[in-house]
Image (tube, helix red, strand yellow):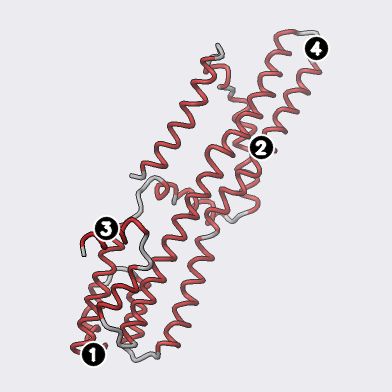
Amino acid sequence: MDKSSIGGVFLAIAGIVAGLLMEGGKISQVLQPTAALIVFGGTFGAVLLQFPMSAVLGAFGRILRIFSAPGKQQDDLLVKQLVGFANKARRSGVVSLDADLETIQDAFLKQAVMLAVDGTEPADLRRIMQVSLDSYAENEDRFPAVFESAGGFSPTIGILGAVLGLIQVMQHLDQIEEVGRGIAVAFVATIYGVGIANLIFLPMAGKMRIRLRDDVKRREMMLEGVISILEGMNPRMLEVKLAGFLDDRRLKKQERAA
């Protein structure tokens, strides 16, 4: 699990709740179902109007990735796998990698190795796989955009809820209880709109974009590795080249091990 994401959620909620209680407030004061219905219903309705259902469902289906730690060990294993392919190709030729195609789990890497085995020129292989990489990045970019849009809509919907609450207040100025209820809905709707935008939707969109950049960088590493193998690069040089795609912490770890 990603400690940063989990800790961030708990810290944000705990800070707001603690501040409310320190000021003498009660949690029940901000639990207004009417305000929640206005903000959440209006926000998701606007999002569905802007994006197709597949994009919205895909965005929510990727929420768990926000709370999962990046696969750093998988990157290390990927480097070892590519270096192993380089050693085998140097001994027996690139065609010998055909026997390893069934063991490759990643579809992008498998396609790149398949093209290399079929004798594709390095420049052509790069162009073909770059199209696939660009298409993947463009398709995946829709999902954080869903939450960015939700983060833009929700504060405005919260203001709309506040206006609706004030309208109710103006219509019942002779009834003190109704006035208080309308003011509560007005302020809580604004809190909901601003809160979910800045504590949930926008941070989630930002973390999704970080995960997307990591995935794109991993695929770029695969592409560079296969092209380098096709060009006959020394396996040790290839390992050094691929290490450039890893973060600084793992580079320092490798330096200490060396």
Q: Are marks 1 and 2 in contact (CB under 8 Å)?
A: no
On the image, which quarter does residue 114 sit in? bottom left
Instruction: Indicate which label's residue lies in the foreground, 3 or 2.
Output: 3
Gap between marks 2 and 4 measured at Cα: 27 Å
From the viewer's perspective, is residue 232 above or below residue 204?
below
Residue holding disc 1: 93
Work out whether residue 70 or residue 178 is closer to the camera in this orientation and state it: 70
On screen, residue 181 versus residue 130, left or right, reads right
Asked which secondary structure carries label 2, the reply is helix
Asked which secondary structure carries label 4, the reply is loop
Q: Residue at x 54, y 19 (%)?
A: 20
Residue 40 position within the rendered picture, expressed as x and y whole percent measured from the top left: 59, 36
Residue holding disc 2: 155
Gap between marks 1 and 2 measured at Cα: 60 Å
Mark 1 Cα shell of 10 Å, populated few (<14), some (14-19), many (≥20): some
Mark 2 Cα shell of 10 Å, populated few (<14), some (14-19), many (≥20): many
On screen, residue 18 versus residue 109, left or right, reads right
Task: Give the mark count.
Answer: 4
On the image, which quarter does residue 167 sit in? top right
Image quadrant containing the N terminus? top left
Gap between marks 1 and 4 measured at Cα: 86 Å
* Amino acid under disc 2: Pro
Residue holding disc 4: 173
N-terminal label among 1 and 2: 1
Q: Are marks 3 and 2 in contact (CB under 8 Å)?
A: no
Residue 75 position within the rendered picture, expressed as x and y whole percent measured from the top left: 31, 63
N-terminal label among 3 and 2: 2
Asked which secondary structure carries label 3, the reply is helix
Gap between marks 3 and 4 measured at Cα: 69 Å
Q: Which mark is residue 253?
A: 3
